[in-house]
Image (cartoon, rainbow, N blue to C red):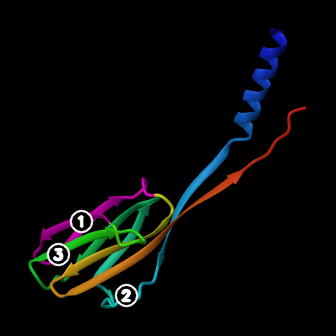
Amino acid sequence: MKTKNIILAAALTGLLFSGSTFRTNAQATATSDKTVSADNKLSVLEVKPMQFRVSYNKSQSNAVSVRILDTDKNVLFSESKRTDSNYLKYFDLSTLLDGTYTFEITDGKEKYTQSFDILTKTSRVVSSIN
């Protein structure tokens, strides 16, 4: 019985020392799907890991429509908001799976997009127990 406890303790200690590290990164990518160049109007900035600040300046109409789309163009988030000149919102996207996503802002007849990739990097450390 004592031998089993020692083996169990050694195995748990080994697991603690050989833990896995996960890190999620987002990368912005260029878009080319019939959209107007965002220039200085649309800004998507990753302020913390997987937390984004989306700002849109100089709106032409009184309302802007904001959506987050996945690769298959499924709408994950949608919001229409009245704005005089600027739109600003923070998004926590830490629950999204790996893949390519797009922020899309429609202002009147113009559409601005910014795509980004979510990639989970995994590193593992191996240790031996003698």
In percent of width and height, residue 52 lies at 37, 64
Distance (Cα) linking label 3 and label 2: 19 Å
In depth, the one of 72 and 52 nearer the eye is 72
Report the residue at 43% width, 57% height from top: 96
Distance (Cα) linking label 1 and label 3: 11 Å
Disc 1 crowd rating (10 Å Cα; few below 14, some 14-19, many 20+) is few
- Give the quarter of the image for residue 6: top right
Q: Amino acid at mark 3?
A: Val
Q: Amino acid at mark 2?
A: Asp
Magenta: main secondary structure equals: strand
Q: Amino acid at mark 1?
A: Ser
In depth, the one of 101 and 123 nearer the eye is 101
Residue at disc 2, secondary structure: loop
Residue beneath label 3, please? Answer: 64
In percent of width and height, residue 24 lies at 53, 58
Residue beneath label 2, please? Answer: 33
Relative horizontal placement of residue 95, taking residue 112 as reference (left or right):
right
Numbered circle sitting on residue 78: 1
